[in-house]
Image (cartoon, helix red, strand yellow):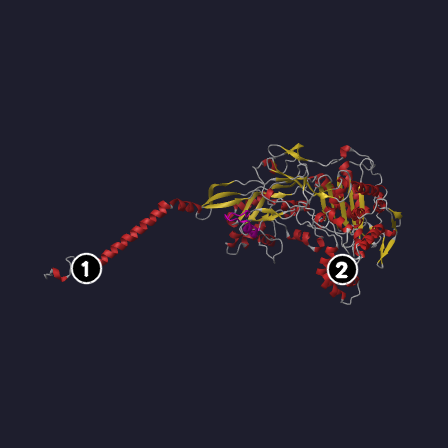
Amino acid sequence: MTHIPPSSGVQQTGRTSRVTGRLLILQVLVLSLLATLGGRLWYLQIRTGQQYVQQASSNHIRTVMVPAVRGQILDANGKALASNSTQLVVSVSRTALLQQKDGGKAVLGRLAEVLGMAPQEVHDKVRLCDAKTPQPCWNGSPYQPIPVTDKATPQQALQIMERREDFPGVAADPTAVRDYPAPNGANAAQVLGYLSPVTQDEINASTGADGKAGFAAADQIGRSGLESVYDSALRGKPGTTDLEVDNLGRVIGTAGGSAASPGDDVVTSIDSRIQAIAEQQLQQALVTLRGTYDKVTQENFKADSGAVVVMDVHTGRVVAMASAPTFNPNVWTGGISAKDYAALTSTSSDFPLLNRAIQGQSAPGSTFKVVTTSGAINAGYGYDDTFPCTSSMTIGGRVFKNFEGENFGAINLSKALEVSCDTVFYNIAYQQWLKDGGNKPKNPGDWLFKAAHQFGLGQKTGIDLPSEVTGRVPDRTWHQKYYDAMKDTWCKQAASGKNDYATAIAKEDCVDFATLRAGDEVNYAIGQGDTLVTPIQMARIYSALANGGTLYQPQLAKAVVSPTGTVVKNLPPIVQGKLPDTQRTLQYIDAATANVVTSGTAAWKFQGWPQDKIALHAKTGTAEVVGKQTTSWFDTYTKDYAIVMTIAQGGTGSGGSGPAVRNIYNALYGIQPDGSIDPKKALLPVPQKNLPAFDANGSVAQQAAFTIDRPVDRPSPLPLSGGPLAVTALAPERRAGSWEA
């Protein structure tokens, strides 16, 4: 055996000092790693363990948004104009479909077979809308279940539920859907509006700094009408349901959630009985006129559209508002079909989605003469001053004719209103134009144009409906602005060499439209030319004439009420201003418009009217439109109501609209064919001032309880805040659709 001395540098263990050093370093590294691992385990399991427990738990929890039950829109008596009904809704998840090998084509085919629908129809309903995709399509969130039908039968729903493997991503559930029940036959489509799903862009835009979205993916929001204006109050607050799922995503239970808060109800001033009659009378007037011969155009009247407004003259509240043509708002429920969408939007439809009471603007014809009369008196003309009512008048080489060439001799303004003499107002307008400097104005008073602005024309009334138009007062400012915008177009057409009416007008306008010409003011004085108004504007004016000169903001909503019947917010009448007239002037116009009914232009349609019991005041209007038949206007008021009706291509004011307006008054006051009054048949002889009374469970009692009609002074139309309103717990009795008194 070889002996190795100690000095040789080799240890008895056989390890050199170098190996020992390396082992030491390795031990240190291992210990360091163990310490790091231990520290990390302590941090994960003890310091932040609860956080990861929660995250692990959330991996098997799926949160589903539960939409709130939408509040109702009620008429003045508590009848539901817009409510909810429970229906079986079949919906499809696009996410689940896209996970199929064929993109869900087979699933949709089987679904179409079960539902008795065409496969293409089902496919179209679940495709996403974009600029190139026509209706039907889905414009809501792509992550939200898309309703295919809300008219599924229990048998169809049972087939889907029993064959889950054949219908992945398809659900059939009882769901509250919007319903427009038309109480008393009142459609009110343009007033109520409609709903459609919230879009992903709207969800994104509603997301706050806390990351919470203001909309749920399943929300329906108002797109027009009262549904749009009061959407935040009606929609409520969605809830959530937390579902427990296994590793395959199958639901195995629930893990809590939050309850949805139902939306509030909106009580309106609409009386569904009067609304139904107004709609019926407007439609009947159109039908009657289409069978009536127009001796001017030598064909029947086209009577293609119209509108009527019934207003409480003491508050500006709208009792009825109808527009024709109209539509059934229920076509939007569950998604509108391609056929229905085309019927509402094609050029041949005459655009029934348009609310002509607030969006239809046309020349007012002679109904505007009450404004001109006010301007003339304020300009200095006397009540007894007389003017020649000749058959025509020549101004600037152009002949301006009286309607049907009538000649009444020398008459005052009151008589001119009664018989609607155009040449009297031509004369006054021409005198004012000359007094203001003619083609070279010097500090013009513009009394006639000033009067229109003081009567609230040329601006929105502020009614609580979206997309109201302003109309037009064609004063000097408007002439200059319009000339600046149209000069190049007119001058180009003037130089085209064409020999037609449009080119002749373009030649004139190219030269001097910026200047208010004599013919402009003369036409304006009788509600013609470039003057435009809406029915709601004229209803407000005639209401002010009736109530002593107060201009109210037109309103539909009276209050917001919780599901338990508590008044959340009163919406009192709003005073916007006063007419620029003395009480004597108002009485002067009042007497003249009463004579229109008894001996003037409307007398032939109001034989036997009980004028001694219910004084009716009216002004007829027959507005000329280039290339079309005349527009019928009939503007009226009593001590309680103003009713304004207009019919496009409907002939004269009294002939076209008079009978329908009379029938509405007959229903309000209970006037019988022989002129007697039957109080038992009077539907609303006095405007309703109170809200319906609600029981503790939210249902409507028989009597009214809350008085709310105390006017609030406000100088100009103000938009609604649209802010969130308080909501309370749901009273199920109010959502069944059969609770009305």
Q: Residue furthest right?
A: 409
Q: Nearer the viewer, mark 1 or mark 2?
A: 2
Residue for point 25% across, 57% down: 25
Label 2 element class: loop
Residue for point 15% across, 58% down: 11
Per the picture, the main secondary structure of the magenta-coloured stretch is loop
Which numbered disc covers residue 374?
A: none
- Amino acid type, callout 2: Phe
Q: Position of residue 727 (x, y in %)?
A: 57, 39
Q: Would you say 510 lies left or right of 35 here?
A: right
Q: Would you say 156 lies left or right of 243 here?
A: right
Which numbered disc covers residue 17?
A: 1
- Amino acid type, callout 1: Ser
Q: Is residue 206 magenta?
A: yes
Which numbered disc covers residue 513?
A: 2
Label 1 element class: helix
> With respect to residue 434, does 274 lie above or below?
above
Residue for point 54% across, 54% down: 106
Q: Position of residue 28 (x, y in %)?
A: 26, 54
Q: Would you say 606 lies left or right of 358 here?
A: right
User: Which segment did they paint magenta?
Assistant: 199-217
